[in-house]
Image (cartoon, coloured by chain):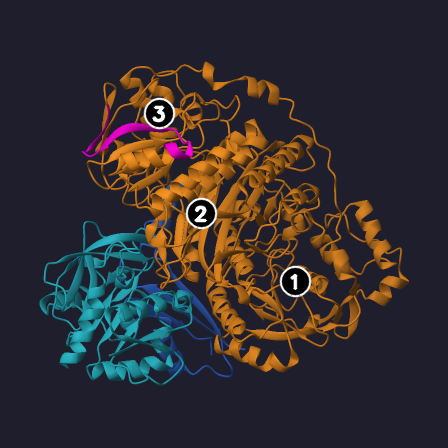
Chain colours: A cyan, B blue, C orange
Amino acid sequence: MRIGVITFPGSLDDVDAARAVRLAGGDAVALWHADHDLLDVDAVVLPGGFSYGDYLRAGAIAARAPLMADVVTRARQGMPVLGICNGFQVLCEAGLLPGALTRNAHLHFRNRDQSLRVERADTAWTSDYANGQRIVVPVKNGEGRYVAAPGDLDRLEAENRVVFRYLGGNPNGSLRDIAGITSENGRIVGLMPHPEHAIEELTGPSTDGLGFFTSVLKALVAA
Amino acid sequence: MPRVVVDVVLKPEISDPQGQAVLGALGRLGHAGVRSVRQGKHFVLDVDGTPDAAELTQIAETLLANPVIEDVELHLPEG
Amino acid sequence: MIDTVDLAAKTPDEPQPYRELGLKDDEYARIRDILGRRPTTAELAMYSVMWSEHCSYKSSKVHLRRFGELPESDALLVGIGENAGVVDVGDGYAVTFKVESHNHPSYVEPYQGAATGVGGIVRDILTMGARPVAVMDSLRFGRADAPDTARVLPGVVAGVGGYGNCLGLPNIGGELLFDDCYAGNPLVNALCVGVMRHEDVRLAKAEGVGNKVILFGARTGGDGIGGVSVLASETFDAEGPAKRPSVQVGDPFTEKLLIEACLEIFAADLVTGIQDLGGAGLSCATSELASAGAGGMHVDLDTVPLRDSTLTPAEILMSESQERMCAIVEPAKVERFLAVCRKWDVLATVIGEVTGGDRLTVDWRGERIVDVPPRTVAHEGPVYERPMRRPEDLDALQADDAARLPRPSTGAELQAHWLAVISSPDGADKTWVTEQYDRYVRGNTVLAQPDDAGVVRIDEETHRGIALALDGNARAARLDPYTGAQLNLAEAYRNVAVSGARPLAVTNCLNFGSPEEPEVMWQFAEAVRGLADGCRALGLPVTGGNVSLYNQTGEVAINPTPVIGVLGVHDDVRERVSTGWRSAGETVLLLGETRDELSGSAWAAVVHGHLGGRPPVVDLAAERTLAEVLGALAREGLVTAAHDLADGGLAQALTEATLRHGTGGRLALDGDPFVALFSESTGRALVTTTDPKAVKDTARWAGVPVTELGTTGGDTLALDGLLELPLAELRAAWTATLPALFGLPEAPVGVRPVGTVPAGTVLSS
């Protein structure tokens, strides 16, 4: 299974997302923001980092990159897309997910090993988790506060589209402790924490993050 | 060269911790009379020829501001 | 009217503002001698920045020669003199690392000063041909509760984090310390480490007549003009900085693009030489590249892309705009070089070429404005043998031993002093700072703060890894700079060893006061002598480093602060050992010997506000043995945790080891519990093990004393017959200090740190 990882100017965790794909048993395919070629991948990861330095707004310029037009088209056709941190910001700016990410409420960059509760285990990226499961994944961002209009938040809750919530403390002030959400069809997931940094005991707080990448491989096989 | 100014501010319902931090600092400096501070962005565009209001409105509303969370004011040059 | 070489030759008596640019009369005369005429304005600018203390090391060179006299090391691939030293770490891998200061700019503009400090050291590593893989920071400020510290510290931390995080470099460790002597002169020392294959090493030389000189990266603006010669050779007087020179402003996004472009350029073998632009900008890059090469260089200065079109040629040559590099490229490879830059949206411009002969010439709009022998600019600057004098107060200071200070004796007193030491700003939990740094990016960080060393995996197949530690106790160096420098070396060496790594090489950042003060110069010379002797005893090469002088506020110099960085290697990084106690029922052992050594200690400073006596004895042979034992214990998997003892002695080490994972212990101390807890004797490590016999046998066989302290487990730290500290209380005291001082919306500001001491004692917080 080919999982594409897009590199924008300033992307940082693209290498780490690729490693996670490989460890899960997939083929990581490097994609370049300026191309119009998704190289036949079955799913796409938008990685963490500071694309375009977070200039204008985090993810704003990357969302308008040439390759994103292709991603949006394929996503609307059901291709699974995972947006991690900056990738989540890009998904919101590109209109694939509702709401927006703003400056952390306490105004600091914050890197923590964060507990999360899995709220929805039947998306393309979370099927290897169980509803209510607690996982520990690093969170590291300065612009990670999720906000949306009250009506949009209510709709997300009503449609069961909140995928992860912060447990044991909200690291950035996200409304309703929302750490990650999904699209209406459950194929696009965006989250601020970094599962690709929780895949090896040697380098992470847990291996809880691998589930994202094993889940999508199964979802692709089933599709 | 004509100059176009675009001001972008967070929508009133979105909390603005940066503005609040500035307000706190003002209070500590003794400026009790300031009730609220909202922080935003100010863009200055130098354009060729006569500014195209429709094009600039689109630029302002779809790129310079994120309409989900921000309000935008476009200031075209006089005349 | 432009000041050309011709004009200069014709107008020898034209007055020039050399004194305002920081040059002395004899230095100006020497320039005239070298050139056979007066210098042009542009040449004067070049000489003034390149001959400043910061660039020429004129006061420190004669002393730094000691490092070059150390025995040759097989591990050293590139030594002192290049942008950074390069060390062989096995399997064909080479590691380059260096620590550098950005002190004065951080006082003026804390965020940008710290940010550009990180940017500068990262470029030094990049320019050696390596991918930068991690950073560390060593920070010192005035008293933690001083108003100016509240101005400077948050900005510096935000700047270190803001720049490093955006570059995608994990911050794997550092230091944060407070002392009144840094009140007007904070210290911001940044370290960067990079990894490459042996064959990838790049050097900074211009070779091959006809090869092009390409300037790439950011546009050149008015950043830091005069920053180098004006700022770093000036101290701040008591009212604050007398002038506000334009500080450098950093753009980490541009530097990230620069890193990726350079690595692609290196991989495609497109450059014959490369240099980054740091202090003294183009003046430095061109003169150094030309000096190191075989011939000369010519530059057309008006081709330099500018951000500010009003800059004069002299200003362009002095500008310290960030995120710029200079490469030497064969004509046949120029197009490919430019194509890589275009791909990454990095501005690149051919500004000149390598020439035959031995002159560096610069033209501005067709007129010659610089024609100098490059070596005289870059390497043959003034060399001073400054007068030195042992500080007059040193005898009295050394005689004022901490042994005379009243000591706690009851369990309650010991507990109160314990809490005071570990909750002092120096001893307190640093999470407030370290949470602002990304430790995970690149996915290879194995250990980071609060572990003793930062450990990074460099090969995912073979599991080879590197370890780094950065230490700089300044109280010890104030009491005895020779011993103090060795103590810092020993501590960094030991910190690398407790992780299970084999120490390999040393870098240093020497922060001192004004070299024009004989007492400061004596401190500097002694520290260098101590460090050189120490490296000889430990068998380690000094790969390079940095000197920062003129760290004073008015007449008062900072304490001598030699910050030492040690690099080590893990053959298998999976065997690394971390510091925290994890499981109950394990045996706690103390390796090394504890003596009654309280002078210069954290206890003396926190409880009594006292600094006096002689620092603890340094026994480098014992450190070497201890390091070998720790390495063997790690390789054999015989210890479950290892933590070195340093500031705050055993009390601090126990606090950190138990709170890490919330595992307490039941311990018993032999002899004087006060000495056991607060002495800062060197050469000691605290380990836990499930096989105490094997550990004791290993240690004793090597001649390392072992003391059994007790057993891990429980939710208190109990010293039988003396005190019992609930971990919750210990944690509350240890974690409250920094948030209380520097605030967070989530933590109330103004809450006093928990922990009281007997009446009549002095708290530094």
Above or below — where is C152 with respect to A34?
A: above
3D distance between C-alphas at marks 1 and 3: 52 Å
Please report, as a chain letter, where disc 2 is located: C
Q: Is residue C620 toward the left or the right of residue A98 in the image?
A: right
Residues marked 2 and 1, same chain: yes
Q: Which residue is mark 1?
A: C285
Residue C717 visible in the current orientation: yes
Please report, as a chain letter, where disc 1 is located. Answer: C
Disc 2 marks which residue? C502
Can residue C708 be found in the magenta stretch? yes
Q: Which residue is mark 3?
A: C677
Residue C720 falls left or right of residue B34: left
Secondary element at tag 1: helix
Does C215 appear above or below C248? below
Of C554 and B54, nearer the camera is: C554
**Would residue C599 be found to the left or right of residue C500 on screen?**
right
Kind of residue sitting beneath label 1: Ala
Residue C45 seen in this snapshot: no
C-alpha gap between disc 2 and disc 3: 28 Å
Q: CA distance from mark 2 to mark 1?
A: 35 Å
Q: Earlier in the sequence, mark 1 or mark 3?
A: 1
Q: Is B73 situated above or below C520?
A: below
Would residue A221 be counted in the magenta stretch?
no
